[in-house]
Image (cartoon, grey):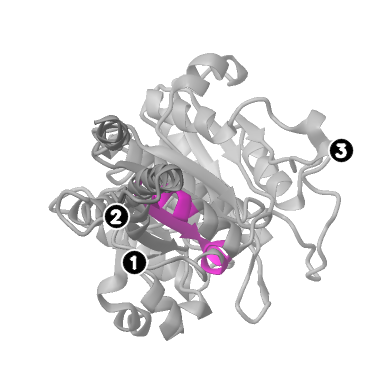
Amino acid sequence: MKNFLIYASVISSISFETQALKLYLVSNHDSAEDYNQALGIATAFEHLSSEKVSIKDLNAKTLDSLDIKSNIERDLSKEKVVFIGAGEGGIASIEDLPKDPNLVTCLISSAALEQYKDKALLEKVDFIALPTHVASDVKEKLGKKLIETTGVAHNHRPDMTTYDEYQKELPPADLYLGVYLGGDTSTDTKEVKFFTEEDASRLADYVIVKAEEINQRGLKPCVLVLNSSQTGKHDIDGKELLTVHREGKADHITELFANKLADKGIEYKIFDFQHNTPENKEWVSAYNTFDLVAGAVRTTKGKMFFPAESTFVISEAADVMPSESIDTMPPGKVLVYYNAAMNDVHKAHVISEKDAGRVSVLENYENIIPASEATESKASASKVIAQKLMELASAKAPWIAEESIYRIEKRKEPLKKVKQYLAIQSQIKAEKNPHLNYDF
């Protein structure tokens, strides 16, 4: 009877609760783009899930694939796991992952990577998420494993908190125009393409005309100017300038744009990007300048201009800016302008955003191609990816599909301990009285 009670006690301690869901984010944290893609999908997951989603954020730069495998296997013994690997770090980390019915795997990137052609890699993953403008041969290669998105995943949310707190930093105006200046880019062949002084000059001319139109309506405009680390990064000979965007110093492109506005008496404010390094901390803004400018434009129903070569910024803008606009411009608040720094991939991305009804396009700093009439609004890339992974996670859930190999093994452990205990007891009794059989 005593042995039976011990057995029953151990059995009752085994949990048969529904499995929870754990999200693994794996990327090189040094790559802000990869890291922010993963964080954006995690945020979308949390918004979509009716249950709490636990998140494990791992840096592939400091952990090898065996470390990550060990972490995941431990969690597979008690819960459902969704692995999201971003960029090169995500690919390296998936190498040793087990095949398990309760493990969902997805790789994400802003562009098709060379490793995606590897057959062994494709067999390892459930999905690879890429923007819809990737080449058709890539789509064909990935087949049903491809999750197509308009734009790329990111971690930027519509947030008026910064504007509410820091609007005092803005010059007073009835209507704000936000201008994000373009930057230099590198091609696959390492050739640098420049956002040129001519680009800055012609963009300024266009913005000046729009500001003057607003003035004629009896409203006071103000142009809020943003830039990036790539703006004016090189001189006219292609040499990288190591002093710009440091210690409060701007670049020649931004200065040219500002001078053009000043010459025409247009009020403006520059929010110059400053490198966030230990030695440059004192020059870095205390708030997110994008959020401040976007908040000002949203509040006054202005307009924002974005460069075509900036895939991430366009995706963020299209997701966070509402559709209302001043009536001197085409519908929507996001206007993307073509420039000399863009390549064919950038153009394909902009066209996909236009076709989805999310942006209008300024061509040659003269002609506007309006956003297509979309029958329904397109969800953000982060939400599309999260939704697809959540669907698969639900379909593979333990109450529908086969249980995790690791969970099954874990559930056997208490039973093994009971049998070991009873076997020891039998052995002790047998030693006391070898003529009786105490086998359990």
The magenta region covers 72-92
Please indicate whether residue 30 sits to the left or right of residue 417 in the image. right
Of labels 3 and 2, earlier in sequence is 3
Of labels 1 and 2, earlier in sequence is 1
- The Cα–Cα distance between marks 1 and 2, rounded to whole angstroms, is 8 Å
**Amino acid under label 2?**
Leu
* Residue 279's disc number: 3
Q: Is residue 44 visible?
A: yes
Q: Are marks 1 and 2 in contact (CB under 8 Å)?
A: yes
The residue lying furthest to the front in this view is 435
Closer to us: 80 or 412: 412
As helix, strand or loop, the secondary structure at mark 1 comes to strand
Q: Residue at x 68, y 77 (%)?
A: 190
Q: Residue at x 47, y 50 (%)?
A: 74
Closer to us: 174 or 43: 43
Instruction: Estimate how packed mark 3 is, as few (under 14), some (14 to 19) or many (20 or more) residues with alpha carbons within 10 Å.
Output: few
Q: Residue at x 18, y 58 (%)?
A: 401
Give percent across and percent down for residue 354: 31, 59
Instruction: Estimate how packed mark 2 is, as few (under 14), some (14 to 19) or many (20 or more) residues with alpha carbons within 10 Å.
Output: many
Which quarter shows the N terminus? top left
Please indicate whether residue 68 sits to the left or right of residue 346 in the image. right
Give percent across and percent down for residue 424: 44, 46
As helix, strand or loop, the secondary structure at mark 2 comes to helix
Q: Which residue is mark 2?
A: 389
Q: Which residue is mark 1?
A: 127
Give percent across and percent down for residue 382: 36, 49
Please indicate whether residue 185 sits to the left or right of residue 17 in the image. right
**Amino acid under label 1?**
Phe
